[in-house]
Amino acid sequence: MNKKPIILGIETSCDETAASIVTETEQGIPIVLSNIISSQVDVHKKFGGVVPELAARSHIEKIDWIVQKAIDDSKIQIEEIDAVASTAGPGLVVCLSVGLSFGKSFASIMNIPFISVNHLEGHALSPRLNSKLDYPYLLLLISGGHSQYLSVQEIGNYRRLGTTIDDALGEAFDKTAKLLGVEFPGGPQIEIMADKGDPNKFALPKPIFNKGGCNLSFAGLKTSILKISKNIKEEKDKFDIAASFQKTIEDILYKKTKIAFNEFEKVNRTQKKVFVIAGGVAANKKIRSMLVKLCKEHKYKDIFAPVNFCGDNAAMIALVGLEKFKMKQFNNLDFPAKPRWQLDNEAAYLKGAGVKF
Ligand code: KG4
Ligand code: ZN
């Protein structure tokens, strides 16, 4: 019986400091031996968003004990670790550098291979941490930092079908929340407020709704809500704004997901249609039930990434490390942090002013 690889994963791309130990069974099914996540919500709350410098400082303060705890909780000995995998991008460069440098030093001291991991690849493979999932599948990643439709062909082979050209969806929820006086991260609170309001009270813009394939855009919503929020007179107005925003997002995702289904089917001539939804915004119950209904209509099997692997975590990074370790895909210790690292090399960079469809 061969010894199965044991991988240490490290994640510091944004505001979660995370470490995890992952291995696999004889049959190649991943086993998460530990999964430690320390969130910095309290650090950034009063600023209404993530402050890179503060995030990096917090990573530096915590990284040693987070990794130590991941090793302790896994019940393995440090010498048993076969490789270390760190997120190298995309993300905030000052934050990425912390986990990347720590991982490189760890690999160097322990004399084991170092593997750099694309954070999006972690999200793309994360549902495999607890479900048996065959390739290919369609992934919708909706988090505070990313909003993408990806066709996951196999490990290392991804086709981006659509992406946000400005704000991520979680960011749009958080910005709306901030305008309504709700603390960061306000996404979950918007969902609750929306239940008490009239979803048809305000007609909000749906940017690139009728063009741009399954690419997404949310920045226009914030501008519109900024204007409306200046006339808030009573609590009820806030609920109506939240409800109108929630409804607009559902409409956008309904239409764009239908387009993504089409594009996925053009890329893959497969009978098995699987749609995986990951990222913090996937916790939104109304978005969930709308997507479940859509999947039924289009005969897709829906899979929601489990809550503990949905947001940023290091188990997903260790899992990519495990797959790369088995393929002997190691990286040199001079591998740089890549704040803008696309999963699909062929995909155009679609952010910022000047993007036209
Ligand atoms: O994936 P995630 O946990 O972490 C990062 O992106 O780093 O996503 C966090 C995002 C935040 O923007 C948060 O407001 C949003 O997910 N979120 C939600 C809900 N729960 C979390 N947005 C809408 N409805 C929710 N129930
Ligand atoms: Zn993420």
Image: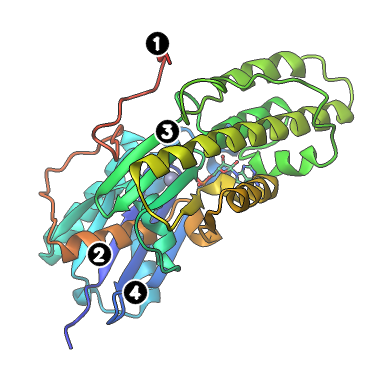
Q: Amino acid at mark 3?
A: Gly
Viewer-nearest of discs 3 and 4 = 3
Q: Which residue is mark 1?
A: 354
Which SS class for mark 3? strand
Q: Is residue 14 above or below residue 245?
A: below
Q: Amino acid at mark 2?
A: Leu
Q: Are marks 2 and 3 in contact (CB under 8 Å)?
A: no
Q: Which residue is mark 2?
A: 322
Q: CA separation, marks 2 and 4?
A: 11 Å
Q: CA separation, marks 3 and 1?
A: 17 Å
Residue 237 seen from this side: yes
Q: Which residue is mark 4?
A: 29
Sequence-wise, the earlier of marks 2 and 3 is 3
Q: Which corner quadrant of the figure contains ligand 1?
A: top right
Q: Residue 222: percent from the left, percent from the top?
A: 62, 21
Which SS class for mark 2? helix
Q: Which residue is mark 3?
A: 162
Sequence-wise, the earlier of marks 4 and 1 is 4
Sequence-wise, the earlier of marks 2 and 4 is 4
Viewer-nearest of discs 1 and 2 = 1
Q: Amino acid at mark 1?
A: Gly
The coloring applied to the image is rainbow
Q: Is residue 86 above or below residue 217?
A: below
In the rendered structure, the answer to whether residue 43 lies left or right of residue 198 reads left
Quarter placement of the C terminus: top left
Task: Name the quadrant containing residue 133.
Answer: bottom left
In the rendered structure, the answer to whether residue 330 lies left or right of residue 77 reads left
